[in-house]
Image (cartoon, helix red, strand yellow):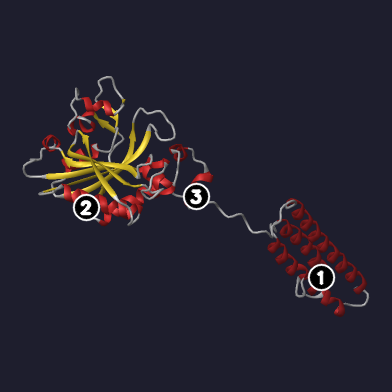
Amino acid sequence: MDWKSAFEEIEKIKQEAQVEINQAGDLSQQETWRVKYLGRKGRLAVLTSLLANSPAEIRPKLGQAVNELKNYLQALLKKVSKEKKVSRKGKNLSLPGKPAISGLLHPLTLTTRRMVEIFVRMGFGVYTGPDIETDFNNFEALNMPVDHPARDMWDTFYLNQEGTLLLRTHTSPVQIRVMKELTPPFRVVAVGRCFRRDLLDASHSPVFHQLEGLMVGKRISFAHLKGILIYFCQELFGKQTRVNFTPSYFPFTEPSAEVSISCVICRGQGCPTCSRTGWLEILGCGMVHPQVFRKVGYNPDEFSGLAFGIGIERTAMLLHGITDIRFFLQNDLRFLRLFT
């Protein structure tokens, strides 16, 4: 470019600079614009270098035009910078952003995974079943016909007038589904929600979770049951934990037992938590009743099995010293963050 086309270049620069500065959305783009037009090797600097070689009679007029262009460009940059600054008023863009709060696993999920992992190490598979069950799977196949008094042990949510559909009262129906599907030998645990018509208080909830275990094969004995549950309790609560089996009754197992552990609070010395006995009851178990085998088409003379069930909420409360089951349902972040 020579001095003769300098005046045309000045008008061109004004037009292009106006358009480009309006498109400069952030500080880095504004700096790119500044270097292009006002930098040491920018378009204004090229025009300024022409002044020395321009004719004497043109130089004052050209110099005035170049100076006016410089003022014009600087005014454009100042105006846009001010507008952007106003739009950012009240924001300190130099501060680091707030960290995103990531989701956390619920304490019941953490407890369930911890329990299941112990049984998986012993070779158990993991099964689930539907929340809505048939009366056959929930009661009848588990040795509780319609007139059986043991049904009074479960206050049930029925879903139809005929009483054939209900919200399962325990995870034991998964045992029936598994035995219908698999051929012995096998060992499985099932986890899931259960529903009973209980009032919500510090130790009861109409919705709760259970872990159910089942092992079926030939020559399965009560000794296998004791070995599995003692190992589970000591892995979960500590090697120092003592385990006690007390005779009990469940319609789907015979013989049946309640399993207690030495109190996790007082270590068996006696405290209010264990009613001064030194023991805490945590699960029920027994050998699968022959009538249950007959309901699913197994020959009780050929196969034997063991079963057990444990409440996940109660286990979590014992592990973490939680005194109220309602904490699990309230979605209080202060409580949930204790388990990170």
Q: Which mark is residue 338?
A: 3
Question: From this viewpoint, is residue 291 visible?
Answer: yes
| Image quarter of residue 253 | top left
Horizontal side, residue 15 vs residue 186: left or right: right
SS category of the residue bearing label 1: helix
**87, 180: nearer the viewer:** 180
| Image quarter of residue 199 | top left
User: Distance from label 2 to label 3 (Cα)?
Assistant: 33 Å
* Residue 230 in picture, x, y percent from top left: 26, 51
The residue furthest left is 301
**160, 264: nearer the viewer:** 264
SS category of the residue bearing label 2: helix
Q: Residues within 10 Å of mark 1 (few under 14, many from 20)?
A: some
Q: What residue is disc 1 on?
A: 6
What's the amino acid at mark 2? Gly
Horizontal side, residue 174 vs residue 207: left or right: left
What's the amino acid at mark 1? Ala
User: Are the two marked residues, 1 and 3, in contact with CB atoms closer than 8 angstroms?
Assistant: no
**41, 4: nearer the viewer:** 41
User: Distance from label 2 to label 1 (Cα)?
Assistant: 98 Å
